[in-house]
Structure formats: C-alpha cells, structure tokens
Amino acid sequence: MLAVVSLAGIVAAPAQSLVSRRVEARADAHALELTGDPGTFESMQRRLSTVNLGDPDPPRWEYLYSASHPSTVERMAAARAYARGER
C-alpha cells in the first residue's frame, strides 16, 4: 500500500507543479497590474534568483517535474511583455 501511495505521488508531481506554476504566474500578472512597474518586477526577480542561488533557466525535465513557480527567465519575459502592452 505504501508503495502505491508513493508511486501515485511521483506520478502526480508534474501535474501538481503545473497547477502551482499557473497560480504563481497569475499572481505575477496581478502584481504587474497593481504596480504597473515591470522594470522593478524584473530587477526583483533577477535579485531573488541571485540571492537564492536559483537557476534562472533550469533544465526542462527538472522544470516540468518539480518547479512550483515559473522560472526567473519566464517571469522576466512576462514583465517585458507587460511593458510592451501585451496583457
């Protein structure tokens, strides 16, 4: 039984990560709408990645399987898109 539960968790992880990334991306979009300051948002993301020693663009397999947030590169691209008026 324990093996089945463990396997289910392993199989479900990518779907859980996808849902989490989408929620976080919506939160980022909301932050950009509230502040209207994509430049500060982008610099904050860069600084957070540096301070947290994060990989700004992790390998695709790692990102799909376990990333609970959009990558730093994706978040910075979203800020640039917002700055261009792409909402």
Image (tube, rainbow, N blue to C red):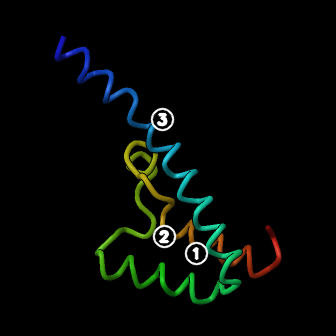
Asked if the residue under mark 1 is in contact with the one under mark 2, i.e. CB atoms within 8 Å, the reply is: yes
Amino acid on which the number 2 mark rests in the picture: Thr
* Quadrant of the snapshot with the N terminus: top left
In this rendering, would 33 be left or right of 56?
right
Point 40% across, 42% down: residue:
65
Point 80% across, 79% down: residue:
84
Point 58% across, 51% down: residue:
22
Question: Which element type, helix, strand or loop, lies under badge 3?
Answer: helix
Q: Nearer the viewer, residue 6 or 77?
A: 6
In this rendering, would 70 be left or right of 8?
right
Question: Which element type, helix, strand or loop, lies under badge 2?
Answer: helix
Q: Which residue is mark 1?
A: 76
In this rendering, would 87 be left or right of 18?
right
Question: Which element type, helix, strand or loop, lies under badge 1?
Answer: helix
- Closest to the camera, between mark 3 and mark 2, is 3
- Number of numbered callouts drawn: 3
Q: Earlier in the sequence, mark 3 or mark 2?
A: 3
Q: Nearer the viewer, residue 80 or 23?
A: 23
- Residue occupying the far right of the picture: 85
- The span from disc 3 to disc 2 (Cα, nearest Å) is 20 Å
Q: Position of residue 71 (x, y in %)?
A: 48, 63
Near mark 1 (Cα within 10 A), the count class, few <14, some 14-19 or many ≥20, is: many
- The span from disc 2 to disc 1 (Cα, nearest Å) is 6 Å
Q: Earlier in the sequence, mark 1 or mark 3?
A: 3
Amino acid on which the number 1 mark rests in the picture: Met
Q: Which residue is mark 2?
A: 72
Near mark 2 (Cα within 10 A), the count class, few <14, some 14-19 or many ≥20, is: many
Amino acid on which the number 3 mark rests in the picture: Ala
Asked if the residue under mark 3 is in contact with the one under mark 1, i.e. CB atoms within 8 Å, the reply is: no
Q: Position of residue 16 (x, y in %)?
A: 44, 38
Q: Position of residue 86 (x, y in %)?
A: 81, 70
Q: Residue 15 — which label?
A: 3
